[in-house]
Image: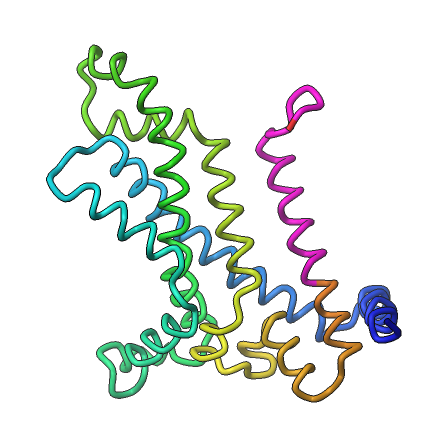
Amino acid sequence: MAEIWQGITAAFWLIATFDADLYEIAARSLLVTCSAVALAALVGLPLGAWLAVSRYRFRRLVIALLNALMGLPPVVVGLVVYLLLSRSGPFGVMGLLFTPWAMIIAQVVILTPLIASIAHQSIRDLWAEYHDLLISLNTTRPQRIKTLLWDSRRALLTAALAGFGRGIGEVGAIMIVGGNIDHVTRVMTTAIALETSKGDFALAIGLGFVLIGVAVAVNLALHMLSGTEVRDRW
């Protein structure tokens, strides 16, 4: 219990004194995760909508595989991305390994199936309501996808937030491809893992509270900016 209180005290002290390392690590965590969520949403949301409106032979199998990929083990993703970006890998000449870009790539691989699957579940229900109307208007498939994405934007925000929640707390994959290099690839989760291994539990707990605070603040900001809260209801 004493270590928890020490952690809370350390968290407030780090924030109140504008600790440079803390704010640098927090900024890097947000940069990596927000970039990964944006790229994953750019791919996952249209993919989820396309799966909802399309009918083809192996559709059920594709959806089942997509749902299964939601549980991709981060360490496996990290290992695959590491091999692809290593010097002997096909993308080794790009020199991305142990950079924030490698961390973003690993998170995009993890988050895209999650966002696409949640988007598919939301858009599928809306497609059932819009089906007859959009068919009667003789709309093309891209027009249907665009309409469904716009009208289900609040539900899709939940998909993006779910991706952010998983991305900001991810440690396995980014530790493998990022290397936890100080002032280069160190983020909140890898810093917590490092401090725990050093036995500095108070600082690790303090960083954990800051991480939770950042996640809550970003979620609240997105809800307010998107207008999700209407007439005192969420």
Q: Is residue 74 left or right of residue 221?
A: left
Q: In this view, does 35 lie to the left or right of 20?
A: left
Q: Nearest the camera: 60 or 84?
A: 60
Q: Does 212 lie within the magenta span?
A: yes
Picture coordinates of residue 219, whole percent (x, y):
62, 45
Quadrant location of residue 45?
A: top left
Picture coordinates of residue 147, whole percent (x, y):
33, 25
Q: Nearest the camera: 132 or 210?
A: 132
Quadrant location of residue 148?
A: top left
Picture coordinates of residue 16, whole percent (x, y):
85, 64
The C terminus: image quadrant: top right
Q: Does 3 lie within the magenta span?
A: no
Question: On screen, 120 above or below 21?
Answer: above
Magenta-tinted stretch: 211-233
Question: On screen, 17 above or below 154?
Answer: below
Question: On screen, 26 above or below 141?
Answer: below
Q: Is residue 14 left or right of residue 188?
A: right
Main SS class of the magenta portion in the image: helix
Q: How is the image coloured?
A: rainbow
Q: Residue at point 38% right, 63% down?
A: 72
Q: Is residue 158 left or right of residue 49?
A: right
Q: Residue at point 88% right, 74% down?
A: 2
